[in-house]
Image (spheres, coloured by chain):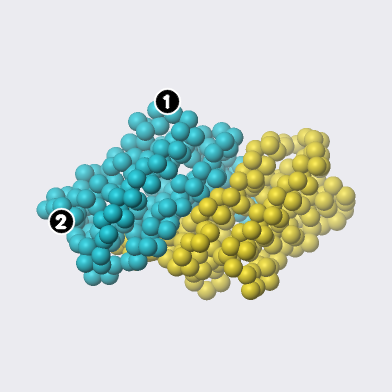
Chain colours: A cyan, B yellow
Amino acid sequence: MMVHDLTHTVSLLTRTPAALNALLRDLPERWTSHNEGENTWSAFDVVGHLIHGERTDWMPRARIILQFGQTQAFEPFDLWGQVRECQGKSLGQLLDEFARLRSENLDELRALNLQPEDLALRGRHPALGVVTLSELLATWAVHDLTHLHQISRTMAHQYREDVGPWSAYLGVLQCAGHSSS
Amino acid sequence: MMVHDLTHTVSLLTRTPAALNALLRDLPERWTSHNEGENTWSAFDVVGHLIHGERTDWMPRARIILQFGQTQAFEPFDLWGQVRECQGKSLGQLLDEFARLRSENLDELRALNLQPEDLALRGRHPALGVVTLSELLATWAVHDLTHLHQISRTMAHQYREDVGPWSAYLGVLQCAGHSSS
């Protein structure tokens, strides 16, 4: 059973809140509050989604694997859970909340002191079937990257007309997106 | 002639170096020094490319528009210019250099105190033909986003196997890239 290097994963997970904070805090709403069209997310929505993941996805699922293995499937993740997370909040508040929750989750992860044999433990995803704890934690990091990818694309979309003929050279403007992210 | 809101552009341009610094500094090389295959760029290479753009692309081209209008075409940009920029340097050094050059360029841009009529001035791109100063400066910002998009994709690629069946759900892993970025 292949397991990945958890220190690499934690290195990335640690940095995402600060990277999003540096990119998004106090940025004009022209960039942060517009989406790519119906049923798509703005940068603001994405931060809410990341918060919802911290609360309900990654560490809760890790705990299920450690406690129940394959005998208990994960709760399905609510892909529109950020609507509740975002209600009445500013982007600055969301960025603070994401940083706090991520930090708490990483503290909990480190305290587990997971060993390679733990990372090879298996759980059950409601749609994907058998997965390992290693895959879950690697996915946590790539999920950050998929949403950084989405945020950069969504923000670039707001300037689609402004760049004139350069749009042909800007890869991000050729990206049609991939399902919700 | 449509011109965009330059304050929005400057807001984004100001934040990119700090965002990349927060994401990449001291991150394990597993994430930063690998590319997506032959003739593609690692995150390290991309920072070198951004440095090369600060030196030879954006403000030099803005100066050409302001001084010569359409009578002098821009110098073609060297898409592999980062090879020289990166030689013998660490990622930390490149991040420092990008931040310094960007800050200097934005100081110069602010000192120009460009008005809407300046932004409507036209220049000549060697391949795209007539462009405006407004389009050039908007492209500078979207160029940052296209490379943030590329960096997130290139880093995610390094974990393609590690996420197991979740690869189907991670949009960034479905992105095939778009020319060099």
Point 35% across, 31% down: residue: A84
Residue B132 visible in the current orientation? no
Q: Is residue B179 rendered to the left or right of residue B127?
A: left
Point 42% across, 58% down: residue: A11
Confirm whether circles 2 and 1 share one chain. yes
From the image, which quarter does the C terminus of chain B lie in? Answer: bottom right
Q: Is residue A149 rendered to the left or right of residue A8?
A: right
Cα distance, mark 2 to mark 1? 38 Å
Point 61% across, 52% down: residue: B17
Return the residue nearer the eye: B21 or B7. Answer: B21
Give the x, y percent position of residue A30. Answer: 58, 35
Q: Circle 1 sits in a helix, a strand or a loop, which is it?
A: loop
| Label drawn at residue A69 | 2
Give the x, y percent position of residue B50. Answer: 64, 59
Parent chain of label 2 = A
Q: Specify the farthest residue to the top.
A: A88
Residue type marked 2: Gly
Whichever of labels 2 and 1 marks the residue nearer the N terminus, that label is 2
Pointer 1: what residue?
A: A88
Residue type marked 1: Gly
Parent chain of label 1 = A
Q: Is residue A136 rendered to the left or right of residue A40?
A: left
